[in-house]
Image (cartoon, rainbow, N blue to C red):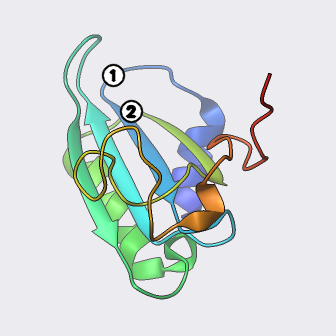
Amino acid sequence: MKWLKKKAKRGVRAFPVGTVAFYGPTDRSASKVVAGVIRAPNADPVLRKWLAEIGDLREDRKVMSEVATFFRDNEVRSVGMIDGILGCPHEEGTDYPDGGVCPRCPFWAGRDRWSGLPKIRH
Protein backbone atom coordinates (compact mmCIF):
# COMPACT_ATOMS: atom_id res chain seq x y z
CA MET A 1 0.00 0.00 0.00
CA LYS A 2 2.91 2.34 0.73
CA TRP A 3 4.18 2.08 -2.86
CA LEU A 4 0.67 2.72 -4.25
CA LYS A 5 0.08 5.74 -2.00
CA LYS A 6 3.47 7.18 -2.96
CA LYS A 7 2.69 6.79 -6.68
CA ALA A 8 -0.81 8.24 -6.20
CA LYS A 9 0.52 11.22 -4.27
CA ARG A 10 2.64 12.22 -7.28
CA GLY A 11 -0.49 12.41 -9.43
CA VAL A 12 -1.08 11.30 -12.99
CA ARG A 13 2.04 12.16 -14.97
CA ALA A 14 2.50 9.58 -17.70
CA PHE A 15 0.96 6.50 -19.30
CA PRO A 16 0.38 3.72 -18.56
CA VAL A 17 -1.83 4.93 -15.69
CA GLY A 18 -3.08 2.68 -12.92
CA THR A 19 -6.36 3.35 -11.14
CA VAL A 20 -7.62 1.92 -7.87
CA ALA A 21 -11.21 2.11 -6.61
CA PHE A 22 -12.67 0.66 -3.42
CA TYR A 23 -16.31 -0.39 -2.98
CA GLY A 24 -18.19 -1.68 0.04
CA PRO A 25 -21.60 -2.30 1.58
CA THR A 26 -21.07 0.87 3.68
CA ASP A 27 -18.61 3.75 3.65
CA ARG A 28 -16.52 2.06 6.36
CA SER A 29 -15.25 -1.18 4.81
CA ALA A 30 -14.05 -2.12 1.31
CA SER A 31 -15.20 -5.55 0.16
CA LYS A 32 -14.18 -4.95 -3.47
CA VAL A 33 -11.08 -3.46 -5.10
CA VAL A 34 -10.98 -2.69 -8.80
CA ALA A 35 -7.60 -1.90 -10.33
CA GLY A 36 -7.30 -0.69 -13.89
CA VAL A 37 -4.44 -0.05 -16.27
CA ILE A 38 -4.92 2.53 -19.00
CA ARG A 39 -2.12 2.23 -21.53
CA ALA A 40 -2.77 5.43 -23.53
CA PRO A 41 -5.25 8.31 -23.77
CA ASN A 42 -8.70 7.04 -24.86
CA ALA A 43 -7.62 3.38 -24.48
CA ASP A 44 -9.95 0.92 -22.79
CA PRO A 45 -8.72 -0.07 -19.33
CA VAL A 46 -7.53 -3.54 -18.43
CA LEU A 47 -9.38 -4.32 -15.20
CA ARG A 48 -8.74 -6.71 -12.35
CA LYS A 49 -11.07 -7.19 -9.35
CA TRP A 50 -10.62 -8.56 -5.84
CA LEU A 51 -13.56 -9.46 -3.58
CA ALA A 52 -13.91 -10.37 0.08
CA GLU A 53 -16.83 -11.48 2.22
CA ILE A 54 -15.35 -10.08 5.44
CA GLY A 55 -12.70 -7.53 6.36
CA ASP A 56 -11.50 -4.37 4.68
CA LEU A 57 -9.46 -4.98 1.54
CA ARG A 58 -7.70 -1.63 1.99
CA GLU A 59 -5.99 -3.28 4.98
CA ASP A 60 -5.34 -6.63 3.28
CA ARG A 61 -1.59 -6.75 2.58
CA LYS A 62 -1.87 -9.70 0.21
CA VAL A 63 -4.49 -8.03 -1.97
CA MET A 64 -2.71 -4.67 -2.03
CA SER A 65 0.53 -6.48 -2.90
CA GLU A 66 -1.29 -8.15 -5.80
CA VAL A 67 -2.54 -4.74 -6.98
CA ALA A 68 1.03 -3.40 -6.89
CA THR A 69 2.30 -6.47 -8.78
CA PHE A 70 -0.47 -6.02 -11.39
CA PHE A 71 0.70 -2.43 -11.89
CA ARG A 72 4.40 -3.33 -11.99
CA ASP A 73 3.74 -6.14 -14.49
CA ASN A 74 1.95 -3.56 -16.69
CA GLU A 75 4.73 -0.97 -16.26
CA VAL A 76 2.38 1.61 -14.68
CA ARG A 77 4.06 5.00 -14.38
CA SER A 78 1.27 6.92 -12.59
CA VAL A 79 -1.50 5.94 -10.16
CA GLY A 80 -4.86 7.57 -9.50
CA MET A 81 -6.42 6.44 -6.21
CA ILE A 82 -8.55 7.69 -3.34
CA ASP A 83 -8.84 5.94 0.02
CA GLY A 84 -12.61 6.36 0.31
CA ILE A 85 -15.36 3.92 -0.64
CA LEU A 86 -17.04 4.68 -3.99
CA GLY A 87 -20.36 3.00 -3.34
CA CYS A 88 -21.84 -0.45 -3.42
CA PRO A 89 -19.65 -3.37 -4.58
CA HIS A 90 -22.48 -4.90 -6.59
CA GLU A 91 -22.91 -4.03 -10.26
CA GLU A 92 -26.03 -2.35 -11.56
CA GLY A 93 -27.54 -4.33 -14.39
CA THR A 94 -25.68 -7.47 -13.32
CA ASP A 95 -26.38 -7.95 -9.61
CA TYR A 96 -29.59 -5.89 -9.55
CA PRO A 97 -31.76 -4.14 -12.19
CA ASP A 98 -30.58 -0.99 -13.97
CA GLY A 99 -31.86 2.12 -12.23
CA GLY A 100 -32.65 0.15 -9.08
CA VAL A 101 -31.24 0.08 -5.59
CA CYS A 102 -29.00 -2.77 -4.50
CA PRO A 103 -31.03 -4.94 -2.09
CA ARG A 104 -27.82 -6.12 -0.37
CA CYS A 105 -26.44 -2.64 0.37
CA PRO A 106 -29.25 -0.52 1.87
CA PHE A 107 -26.65 1.94 3.24
CA TRP A 108 -26.10 3.36 -0.27
CA ALA A 109 -29.81 3.82 -1.10
CA GLY A 110 -30.32 7.57 -1.57
CA ARG A 111 -26.66 8.40 -0.90
CA ASP A 112 -24.05 10.08 -3.04
CA ARG A 113 -21.35 7.53 -3.88
CA TRP A 114 -18.56 10.12 -3.73
CA SER A 115 -19.34 11.65 -0.34
CA GLY A 116 -21.47 8.95 1.31
CA LEU A 117 -23.91 11.69 2.32
CA PRO A 118 -27.65 11.55 1.66
CA LYS A 119 -28.62 13.02 -1.71
CA ILE A 120 -30.48 16.30 -1.55
CA ARG A 121 -33.81 16.15 -3.34
CA HIS A 122 -35.06 19.27 -5.06
Marks 1 and 2 close (CB-CB < 8 Å): yes
Viewer-proximal residue, 86 or 82? 86
Crowdedness near tag 1: few (<14), some (14–19) or many (≥20) residues, C-alpha within 10 Å? some
* Mark closest to the chain's N terminus, 1 or 2: 1
Residue 98 location (% of width, % of height): 32, 40
Quarter containing the C terminus: top right
- Name the residue that disc number 1 marks: 15
- Quarter of the image with the N terminus is bottom right
Give residue 59's quadrant in the image: bottom right
User: For this rendering, which residue is in front, 26 or 84?
Assistant: 26
Task: Give the labeled residue for mark 2.
Answer: 77
Residue 86 pos. (x, y %): 56, 48
Can you say whether 107 is above or below 77 in the image?
A: below
Q: Amino acid at mark 2?
A: Arg
Q: Is residue 70 left or right of residue 65?
A: left
Which residue occupies the extreme top position in the image?
42
* Residue, far bottom: 54
